[in-house]
Image (spheres, rainbow, N blue to C red):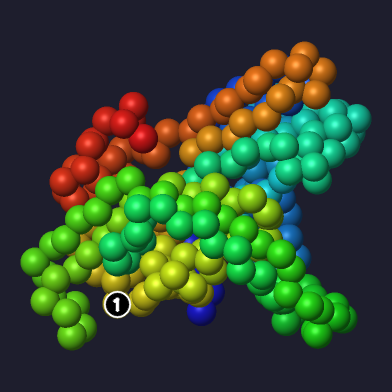
Amino acid sequence: MSERPIPIEYGELTILYQDENYVAIDKPSGLLVHRSFLDKHETQFAMQMLRDQLGQHVFPVHRLDRPTSGVLLFALSSEAARDMNQLFIEGTISKRYLALVRGFAPESVFLDKPLKEELDKIADKFADQDKAPQEAQTQFNCLHQAALPIPIGKYPTVRYSLVECFPKTGRKHQIRRHLKHLSLPIIGDVNHGDNQHNQFFREHFELRRLMLFATELSFVHPYSNESITIKAPLGDAMLSICKQLGWPDEEKDY
């Protein structure tokens, strides 16, 4: 099933952090990071939008899946991109996500489960189809749980959790696939999720997005040696859902 969102026009991107070498934006859910021949119909891309907004070239140093929102970092030169990429390779950059999932999550779990690379039928037509699974680790912490007296399927109530996710590796769809393995699919995930609960959220909360948020990116600056933490807000729509589930509805609580 396609994750293609309803076409919308994005306004000016929100800049979360900027210095002479790097700039970070709050990427909206549904916006592609850069142009892709798999989405030829698209006309807006974070990379080009930010380039036009700043009036200079930008260089992506990592990626966010199209339906994921939150902190997306770019370099302002190829040299700065190279040096930041090295930090990603060394694993010294910390990434924090929040995910709204179906089910009651355990208080804390570290999942060490290798993942076989997900290949696209078109883009990866000539890739090695028998490549061995790659190392993948994620730390999950449950922040909140909620149960609603609404029957879905064979159960008389629905259960949801807000989970803090710290991926230690960067495999494609790692958080989504690891949560699915734990029987905690992310709400709004059409490829790895639960379609009944996705539909419930569309109808009950008017929600039409993947509930995965890249909330923080932390690193030691390659040039100043300062400890940098860049944060992205959850947004009013998510905070409204949190309130309806009985959780805190203030940004500072997350």
Q: Is residue 44 left or right of residue 233?
A: right
Image quadrant in which you'd find residue 145:
bottom left
Closer to the camera in the image, 128 or 67: 128
Occupied quadrant, residue 131 = bottom right
115 lies left or right of 21: left
Give the camera-side residue of 170 and 193: 170
Local packing at callout 1 (Cα closer than 10 Å; few below 14, some 14-19, many 20+) is few
Which residue is nearer to you in this view: 213 or 166?
Answer: 166
Q: Position of residue 101 (x, y in %)?
A: 36, 61
Hey, what amino acid is under mark 1?
Gln
Relative placement, left or right, of 79 versus 40 is: right
Tell me which residue sits at (21%, 43%) in the image.
247
Residue underneath mark 1 = 196
The reply, left or right, for residue 252 in relation to residue 158 is: right
**Residue at image location 78% in from the left, 78% down from the top:** 132
Locate residue 173, reporting x and y percent. 60, 63
Total marks in image: 1
Q: Is residue 27 above or below residue 13?
A: below
Taking the spot 33% from the left edge, 46% from the top edge, the residue there is 143
Residue 139, x across and y down, in percent: 52, 52
* Depicted 200 relative to depicted 55: above or below: below
